[in-house]
Image (spheres, rainbow, N blue to C red):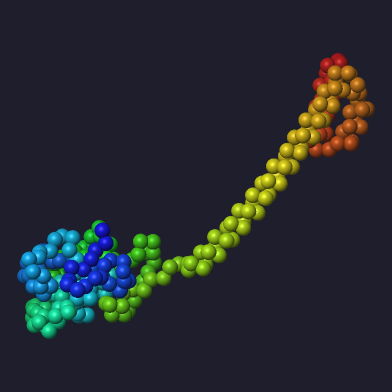
Amino acid sequence: IMPTCVALKCSNRSGSSSNTSFFKFPFDDKDRLHHWISNINRQDWKPTPHSRLCSHHFKQDCFIQFKTRVCLTSDAVPTVFHRNSRLQAMAKYSRRKKKGICTTNIHSDMHVCALTAVTHDHSYIGRTEMSCEDRTSAGDNTAKASSSLPFDHQQYTVKESPRALKRTIWTVQNRLAAYRKKIKKHREQSKRLRRKISSLSSVITTLREKMLVSTNCADMLEATFGGVAKEILTRVNARISLARS
């Protein structure tokens, strides 16, 4: 199922934009979860483990760039909505909480990214850990993180453009057609050779039955024919010599 943003008047869904990320609700942080739900302001609604909120509802200071992933800080709270004037006060919560939290140092050997099975989803861990989004696409593990702001996520390029792929297909099809022609030509040559061998075998059989093949005659035939025909005549002549002896 493609994740869809649960915010009112927001139609963002996973796959619709390469610059949009989707985050899980912080169920392990009850205080922050309460602020998330309050800011979304949906009546008689509670989030589920499958609920997602897109990155358009967070300020830029709520993001951390980590290698090829875009991560939320451990105290991030969504404050960007259509009724933004009502929610500006909620931004103070994030700033107050930041004062009591040590700055998280990002080191690849000291932090664990909680990745979920759903593409573009995020989990949330402790203060010294981050919830991260793996922005690498399914078939492209070579994309590198850009140095732009969080909303300018990493830019990915397909290894080959559609035009290059089309040209490759055309080249392969031409080679395949050429190989098929060669195969057909070899088959025709083999067929003609089999007919010739069959004809020569019939003649030799008749000569053998009538005992008309002598050594000199066999030499003449060997001089006249070459290749497979010559080999066949040589073998037949040897058999006739053995039969006479």
Q: Can residue 50 be seen in this view?
A: yes
Q: In this view, does 77 lie to the left or right of 215?
A: left
The percent coordinates of residue 155 (x first, y second) are: 36, 74
Residue 244 is drawn in which quadrant?
A: top right
Identify the residue shown where x is 21% and y is 73%. 10
Q: In this view, does 211 lie to the left or right of 108?
A: right
Please indicate whether residue 164 sits to the left or right of residue 130 in the image: right
**Residue located at (18% from left, 68% from top):** 6
The relative height of residue 232 versus residue 2 in the rendered view (above or below) is above
Q: Where is residue 34 in the image (x, y as percent from the top left)?
A: 7, 70
Q: Where is residue 149 in the image (x, y as percent from the top left)?
A: 28, 80
Q: Of 64 and 210, which appears nearest the observer? A: 210
Where's the C terminus, which quadrant? Answer: top right
The residue located at (15%, 75%) in the rendering is 78
Which picture quadrant has residue 77? bottom left
Q: Nearer the viewer, residue 10 or 22?
A: 10
Q: Residue 169, located in which quarter of the rendered image?
A: bottom right
> Looking at the image, can residue 98 be seen?
no
* Residue drawn at point x = 39 percent, y = 64 percent: 140
Return the x and y of residue 13 as percentages of the image width and height: 26, 67
